Amino acid sequence: MKFKSFFIVTLLSVLAVSCNDDITDIGAGIQLPGDTIIVDARSFDLTSENYWVESIYSRPDSFLLGTFVDNISNTGTTYADIFAQFMPPVDFEYPAGSKGDSIKLFMYYYSWFGDKYSPMQVNVYEMNRGNIFNYSQAYSSNIKPDDYVDPANKVLLGSRIFTAKDAVIPRSDTTAIAFNLSSDFVKRFSDNMLPRVFNDNESDTENNVTKFHKLFNGMYITTDFGSASMIYVRSIVMRYYFSYKYFAPGDTVPTVVKTYVNYSASPEVRQVNRFQQPKKAEVKSYYDNKPEINLISSPANIYTKIKIPLEQIKNSISTPGRKLIINSATLRIDATDVKDTTLAQPLAKNLLLVEKSKYEEFFRKRLLPTDTTAIVASVSYELDEDDTSKYNFYYSFDMAKLISTKFKNNPNITGDIEMILVPVSLTYNGSNSIIEIKHQNTMSTTKIYSGSHPDPEKRMKLKMVYSGF
């Protein structure tokens, strides 16, 4: 009995010490001498449903290109194509008498998804509508090609059939596909570009980079056939080959110099990855009959919406006359039906849990996660208790600060709060702090146990530990 009493006193001491200024106090009760201290734990069932996404804001680090029909996870068909502006070589001047010889477009990629031997045909069109991207504007992934490529006067610059395994540059860290662009385009490009020197001074209305984009709007890169592979394009370069002559001192015959200069789809200009999922109605019908699971699928496909019953939680854990401390509040999202086949879509590496009302603003303004509106979790795993040859994958969200803040700001809170699970890509600085969050634009599908799962052990829950002093 003495040991038990000592254990309880020690536990309460630890809880009291661990409650710092970051944990919100609710209420203003004063603990009187002899009052007992409440320590309790509760779980709350949550409501969840699939959330169908029309588009995302496209700010890609890499580009997805191709078509994939998902017959394993049944998430439909994904089409991905690319709009790209190019950066001219700033302050570069072509030697006198230069003549354009040819132009090649190179797409460099590290990896692919799907069947690496499945052929795809890629077509490259000129963006000839006169519409150019504004670097500071956010563009959605469902932009219309007809706004940038005249459907009645399409200009095909190049085309090629290849497989993801094909490589032009035999290196272990990258592959590349080259497209020979049309001779007509070479002539038009030479006539417009060779006499000009471009710089990045926006006040120079005749020779700045914006002027270049007005002369050459960019390229629309899309696929014609193929349905089993997609490539992750790391960078795109348009290489302009030209030649010129010069006389070395004492020479009577000119020397012909053949060289090239690169026009890159670089971070200094805008690119947009376009995504389509034309089978969403069929996918929705299929998963409406499977309420026990929810989906999180990228790019721009399906997320999961969760309702947190704040009013129910507040009423259930209230401690009249005492200060309420939320010691922990953990939302664990368990993945299921994890596939490890070559053509199976991988789990999302990182998920963002964000308030539905703040979702649009978060990505449009490129905000960072906070404990009070948006929380990030990375995939974790553990050995299965019943089968040690199997791993269970899950995401764990610390909800304590968010719920405490909601209670503090609204003591008479009612109803629920809706939140969305979004697959994201993260950028870190040298101190391992997150400095940027983007919508994930790579292929992934994560199936999770829903709030309606019939097994209470698997059902989505919020687990809390709280105390009253």
Image: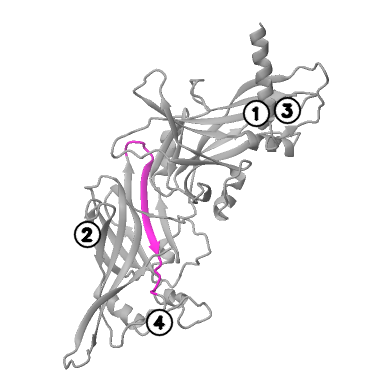
Q: Earlier in the sequence, mark 1 or mark 2?
A: 2
Q: Which residue sits at x=41%, y=67%?
A: 85
356 vs 426, nearest the viewer: 426
Residue 427 lies, in percent from the top left, at 48, 50
Residue reaching furthest to the top: 1
Give the residue type that dot 2 points to.
Val
Q: Relative to 86, say whether 121 is above or below.
A: above
- SS state under label 4: loop
Q: Which mark is residue 327?
A: 1
Give the residue type that dot 1 points to.
Asn
Within-10-Å neighbours for mark 1: few <14, some 14–19, many 20+: many
Q: Earlier in the sequence, mark 4 or mark 3?
A: 4
Residue at numbered disc 2: 168
Give the residue type that dot 3 points to.
Leu
* Distance CA(mark 1)–CA(mark 4): 64 Å
What is the quadrant of the C terminus in the image? top right
Residue at numbered disc 4: 197
Are the residues tagged 4 and 3 within 8 Å (C-beta)?
Answer: no
Q: Which mark is residue 378?
A: none
- SS state under label 3: strand
* Distance CA(mark 2)–CA(mark 3): 65 Å
Q: Report whether 13 appears left or right of 334.
A: right
Q: Which quarter of the figure has residue 86?
A: bottom left
448 vs 469, nearest the viewer: 469
Within-10-Å neighbours for mark 2: few <14, some 14–19, many 20+: few
Residue 85 is covered by the magenta coloring: yes
Q: Report whether 194 appears left or right of 139.
A: left
Are the residues tagged 3 and 1 within 8 Å (C-beta)?
Answer: no
Q: Which residue sits at x=42%, y=67%?
A: 148
Q: Which quarter of the figure has residue 144?
A: bottom left
Read off the magenta span.
Answer: 71-89
